[in-house]
Image (cartoon, rainbow, N blue to C red):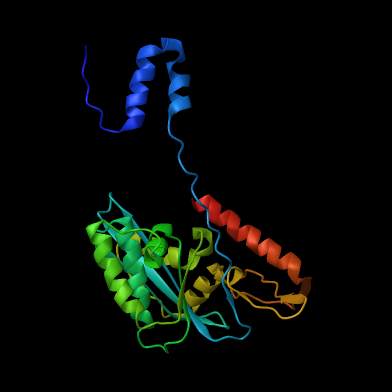
Amino acid sequence: MEVKKCERGEEEILGMLAASTTPRGEVEEMLIAISPRKDCRLKISMPPLTVETDEELLVASFDGSATIKKKGGSFSAVIWKLPEWTIVASESRYVHDLTVNEAEYNGLLLCFELLADLDRGRVILCGDSSLVIRQMRGEIDCKAPGPQLLRHKALEKLQSWPSHEFLHMKREWNQSAYRLASTALQSEKGRTVVAEEDRQDLMTLNRLDELLKPKQDGHLARVTAIARSARRIRHEPEVIQEEILQRIRIQRIVQAQDEER
């Protein structure tokens, strides 16, 4: 008789018994039949964030990147002022010995650094790192020592911004911050964007305004068509039924969230 220690509990014992008493050709089907069912992952779709019409607030977008080849990482932050969607500050940095998650957290910390001298009103913090956003929301644990320390620093900074929200989105909507971070990674040096032409380029890449839509009163919503030229020329608004507009927006965001999982 062969004695074997079972380490995974009842399901392993059942598996061994099934394997010893079942013909070889039917073992796989039998193991599937007795294997414990895993709970389906609960998918929570966050409703799209909205802002008041002509509301004055700040939006901070960040990004981080790192590669083993370069033995370093870069991160960036862009501070937007609404309702104009103008850039208040934008900067990128390069640091040696950074992981991707550490770079993302450093991008978030850079946001707080650029926000330090601004009015403490409402701020929306946007990033394409699902891990960082969910950890900052407290939805998942942060166990790695490096990111854990950076998260603690970010939570301390967050205390000075009582009216805050986090928004996770796909990278295609975070192109302004992504451009800064990727350029810094390639050149292995960061920069502060001060030239108006460079800021206009970042504004052209910006798609956050597609996610943060003004709340609308009544049954109709006015939507401004956007021409993505170098100067972001805006045309006269069109009138679209609010119900249709809301459905399109929610479907796009839910689809993007599902693709990130």
Which quarter of the rendering shows the N terminus? top left
Horizontal side of 47 relative to 89 (left or right) equals right
> Can I make out residue 188 in this image?
yes
Query: Which residue lies at the image location 28% right of the left edge and 61% below the top edge?
Result: 147
Of residue 46 and residue 181, the one placed in the foreground of this image is 46
Query: Which residue lies at the image location 50% right of the left edge and 44% below the top edge?
Result: 40
Q: Position of residue 156 (x, y in %)?
A: 30, 76
Horizontal side of 196 relative to 187 (left or right) equals right
Q: Position of residue 137 (x, y in %)?
A: 41, 66
> Can I make out residue 97 in this image?
no
Q: Position of residue 210 (x, y in %)?
A: 61, 68
Query: Which residue lies at the image location 48% right of the left edge and 20% below the top edge?
Result: 29
Query: Which residue lies at the image location 73% right of the left edge and 77% below the top edge?
Result: 222
- The correct choice, above or below, for 55 with respect to 260 in the image is below
Q: How many numbered tags mark residues here?
A: 0
Q: Quadrant of residue 94?
A: bottom left
Q: Position of residue 186 (x, y in %)?
A: 35, 58
Horizontal side of 208 relative to 144 (left or right) equals right
